[in-house]
Image (cartoon, helix red, strand yellow):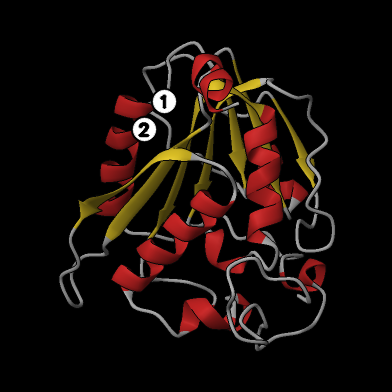
Amino acid sequence: MDHDPLGLPPGAFAKLDAEEDELFYEPARLVYHIDEGAVAALTEFYRRVLPPGGVLLDLMSSWVSHLPPDIAYAEVIGHGMNAEELAANSRLGRWFVQNLNRDPTLPLADDSADAAMICVSIQYLQRPIEVLCQVRRVLRPGGVVVISFSNRCFWTKAVAVWRALDDNGHARLVEAYLRHSGFTEIATHRLAEWIEDERDPMIAVIGRKAAAGDAARRR
């Protein structure tokens, strides 16, 4: 990307596989991309931070959203790169396919969602600030975004800066993404610790869209 508000070196958002993302994501992958312990930890975290009865945006989703099965939400809107995966996700009320690296503009109204999630996919965004600014636009005041990740990824599709960092570096990078996108109350939570060859780590970084009163005070 030519413009980088983070001040990263040229090529920070390059990928080893420069082919169009649509080609890579064409085959449906109906599998878990993190282990059962990481899934359980994320689901429990969602139980604590996502508002029951709210409208959720599951960005860069797939055939499963890892939401608590016993909690009802007003609507879960899904986005991804593979229509078959999204159609298989029973938690999604509606969904759309879009390459955010080409077009980061979300086809959703301002202040229309209560929370958003990006699960084990932030490492593939080449325009993360633009995408997260769109997420902030779509969230209602006080809404939360949860960005979760492990140490697994499709290596050839992860951006260079992600490939160069460890878990702590990933957390700091995502915090910077959120800060530069205008989110507040940014915090990192370690949900599951890594045990070599036995257990995946799970980290979630959250941020909030300023409540209406907070935004007014800043003006």
- Of 128 and 158, which appears nearest the observer? 128
How many numbered badges does the structure rendering display? 2
Query: In this rendering, does residue 89 appear at all?
Result: no
Circle number at residue 46? 2
Q: Residue at x 53, y 47 (%)?
A: 118
Residue 11: % across, % down: 66, 87
Mark 1 and mark 2 residues within 8 Å of each other at the beta carbon: yes
- Say which residue label 1 marks: 50
Q: Quadrant of the N terminus?
A: bottom right
Q: Quadrant of the C terminus?
A: top right
> Height in image: 177 above or below 66?
below
Position of residue 81 in the picture relative to residue 152 (left or right): right
Residue 66: % across, % down: 43, 39
Q: Quadrant of residue 18?
A: bottom right
Looking at numbered disc 1 in the image, what kind of residue is underneath it? Leu
- Of 165 and 26, which appears nearest the observer? 165
Q: Residue at x 36, y 62 (%)?
A: 171
Q: Residues within 10 Å of mark 2 (few under 14, many from 20)?
A: some
Q: Quadrant of residue 166?
A: bottom left
